[in-house]
Amino acid sequence: METEILKIAAKHLKPFLLILSLFVFYRGHNEPGGGFIGGLMAGMALVLYAGAFGVEEAKKLRLAKPLFFIGLGFGLALISSLLGLLVGQGGFMTAVWNQWQFAGFSLKLGSPLLFDLGVYFVVAGMLVKVIFSVMEEDV
Amino acid sequence: MNLIIAVLIGLLYATGAYLLLRRSIVKLVLGILFLSYATNLLLFFTGGLSLMSPAFDDGSYPDLSQLSDPLPQALILTAIVIGFGLAAFSMVLIYRFFKETGTVDLDELSDNKK
Amino acid sequence: MDIFTAILLLFLLAAVAPFINASFPRISGWILSLPPIGIFLWLLSLVQGVSQGEIHAFAIEWLPALGINLMFRLDGLSLLFALLVTGIGGLIMIYAGYYMRSYQKTNRFFGYLVFFMASMLGLVAANDWISLFMFWELTSLSSFLLIGFKHEKEAARKAALQALLITGLGGLALLAGLILMSLPYQSFAFDAVFSNPDLFTQSPLFIPATVLLLIGAFTKSAIFPFHFWLPGAMQAPSPVSAYLHSATMVKAGIYLIARLHPVMEDQAFWTYSLSLFGAFTMFVGAWFAVSQQDIKKILAYTTVSALGTLVLLIGTSTAYSVTAALVFLLVHAFYKATLFMMAGNIEKKTSTRDIRLLGGLSHFMPIAALISMLALLSMSGIPPMLGFIGKELMYEAKLNAPKAGNFILLMGFLANAFTVFVSARIAFDVFYGKCKWPGQLPKEPALSLSTGPAVLVIISLLFGVFPNSAAVLLEPALKSILPAQTLIHLKLWHGFNEILLLSALTVLLGAVLFAFRTKVIAMVGLLNGKYFNLKLSERFFLGIDLFIRLTKKKTTFIQHGYHRFYLMTILITASVLLFLSIFKLSFPLAEQLELNSWTIILLAAAVLIMVGAIATVVAQSRLVALVSTGISGIGITVIFVLFSGVDCAITMIMVETLTIVIGAMVVYHLPKYLSFSNKFARWRDMSIALLFGVVMGTLAFLSANKKPMEKVSDYYLENSLSKGYGENVVNVILVDFRALDTLGEIIVLGLAAIGIVALLTLNKTKSKN
């Protein structure tokens, strides 16, 4: 199953896919995309790599810490849920938004984005963990 | 168009039901997949079919009711992802099931057979 | 202090009673007797007010939405019972504190006993049917725990189970009856029924509700044909027999009947049922007492007889009979509790309760003998005990009974004679005569063991000599049962009249029977063995066994263990039910199909889905089936794209791909495809599947474009940009409006990941073997 073309493709596509997934995630609030889709894409980048180089090799990657990312995702989701309770006058899971403006750009960030980022990490982590586990069985 | 989709939903449910009734555990899981397809489509269908007008509101639409219904879509999106979790888990369960029992026939599991 | 506080206090005491007993094992009985006696004294202080017509009511909201409140009241009837419960309860505590020392695990025993006391107090003080029912069930429960206290004995377990099942069955009937009765009033409060009894008695539900209420009362109070659990309950330790199964709990049914009586006193069905079952139970109980040899069994059967008498007297529904019932209630509680405690003392000192083995005990325990003699005099209805007054009144009531007076009189006469007979047996064969048991000679019971019986007997004696001191207690109780009547003046001496003659004849017959006791017992035993061998208890257990066997058969029939047949049941049921609910709806006409580019895309997607579905079904290889499933999925993705579900489509296509990748990796390990099912099964499943598909398709067609949650959808559409700062409404719903759902969803994903890891890594060694 290890072919050179796949290896080269996987190696070079990985960073692109990861960046693309982040982009898809960010634009999800206004365009198609979001945490699920971004997370799935990010996970797929690693899965592709594992398909090309084998799961042992893929596990050595710095990003291949699925359980960490699942935990991180839950943490972010929870923090964003609590933000409304702490900062805003709303309650649990109430959105908090803030806007920054500099040099003509305006950047709007809010707790829903943070929440979506949590979803992103959980989905990506779950995907990687599951596929890696199954692939290890293959050996 | 409604009729076509309705027939498709019926077909998907029938396929799912038929597969659920097989003795093979693999078909059982595929049956579950078909049932979730059917249900997603049914849910989608209740929101009404609106061609190529996704629910994106950039503030320029005069009449928002022209857009497609976002609520079923949000539900379906959630259902798809959960369905993925379920499917992945079931697949691995089949694998483990086979490793432990050496069979993929559900009837072999029954106490009555032993 | 109010009654609610008192009940709460006792429940709290029940919680701490085990610790009290563990910390002060030597004086725990005395400590635990203080709260009930305190409550007793407080209740006593209310007697004056209540006798002048005061009613202490108390209510707190419980489930206001259902119209259910915790309501309590203290009127004459409640107060009388509450005094019995707390007063005798306090004495029993003192007794049990010493009596239970020889037992194991007594801590919990005291917990149960106080728990019972609290429940019983709640029962008699309740002012609405739901509270009454709740406490009613709590008493059944504590009775079960107490009868089965010696749970290492099978007989005790069986008796406890039997009592629980019978009183539990009665409890269910009671609940149903109470609900039927309350239906016309839309309220569970006592006052609703009392203020307008006609609404119930004229309703078509009257007879069924009354039957259910009577079953409830009869099971609790051991009225024939439910009487047999009570002799079985003698497996309980003696304090329990004295308290629950003679003085208080078995009177709960009597209390209920007395409580309901004002509502139904004019109803022939009610009064006839009470008279009939009461009279019969009165006789049967006494009859079966004759041939018993176990003191506690004798006492149990006479209790059955006494309960029947009480039901009969209330059912007779005259001022005489109800006065008699109230007096007899007190009389019976006093002497029966005393005798049960004495039976416990005898068993403790001689380690037997069999009359044939006992005798001459008065030489060794003169005080105990004196107490027992007085109690037995009261039981036989001999002056100067209160029992005499009770019996006089009973005869008077029966003589004046409006219906079937002579028959009832005869039954009562025989029952009383039998009671005299068994009293004489206990008196003479246990306390006098030769001592027959081997081994150590018994000694006088300890102070704690004799206090309770002595107090009760003295009260019984005092009331007998000064009967009108009881009137202040009984008058308001009578008013609660028969509001229009007044209490009959109580006096010890009525002069020479037919009633005194009847009393004398009763004693005479009892004495004659006693003189020929060996023959009488043998004859009654023979008759019982030959003709009256009802063996209700055995039959009850046979019935239970039968029920269990049936249930097992039914369960193995329904729970056959084949998942396919479960699924078939579900699918067919769902199809039929759905069909029944949708076939009446009108079908919209399908619109004309224009053949434009959209339609062509849709048709292409439809073909994709169909091909995928059919290929999955007919595929001979697992991999083909898997990929075909994926093809159907992609067809659905196309439909999502076409009809504006962009995010759904993107997610779906990725999920499909990944599912198939994982599936392929798993299928790779599985054996070659095998066909398990035969042709018949395939056709059968095919038809079921088609049925289901047709119904679901029709449902889908009907639900198209229904927008069941349009208002919600519109809200999201309108506020997505302004409040959620996002143009993608679906995404805003997911991460903002309905973020909690999404949080739940990622938790599911996390759990699935954990589950998969667990499936793959845990218990590896076993699978390798």
Image (cartoon, grey):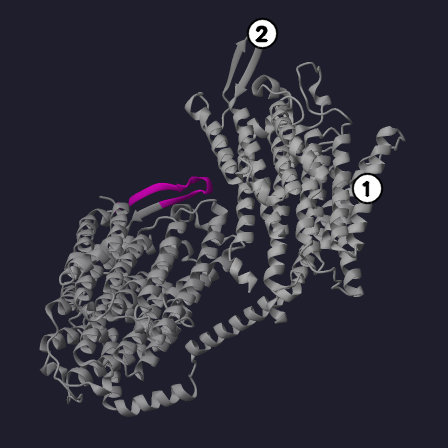
Q: Is residue C675 magenta?
A: no
Q: Is residue C131 left or right of residue C616?
A: left
Q: Is residue C391 left or right of residue C167?
A: left
Task: State the image coordinates of residue C45 (x, y, percent, origin top left).
Answer: 17, 49
Nearer-the-camera pick, C767 or C735: C767
Labels in figure, total: 2
Task: State the image coordinates of residue C737 (x, y, percent, origin top left).
Answer: 56, 27
Against C130, residue C235 (above or below) is below
Circle on res. C555: none
Q: Nearer the viewer, mark 2 or mark 1?
A: 2
Have a look at marks 2 and 1 and say if they share a chain: no
SS state under label 1: helix
Residue found farthest to the top: A103
Q: Chain of mark 1?
A: C
SS state under label 2: loop
Nearer-the-camera pick, C285 or C369: C369
Q: Which residue is mark 1?
A: C608
Q: Is residue C463 visible?
A: yes
Residue extent of the magenta highlight: C53-70
Q: Is residue C58 magenta?
A: yes
Q: Neighbour class for label 2 at 10 Å: few (<14), some, many (≥20)?
A: few
Q: Which residue is mark 2?
A: A104
Residue found farthest to the right: C595
The amino acid type, in three-letter code, at marker 2 is Gly
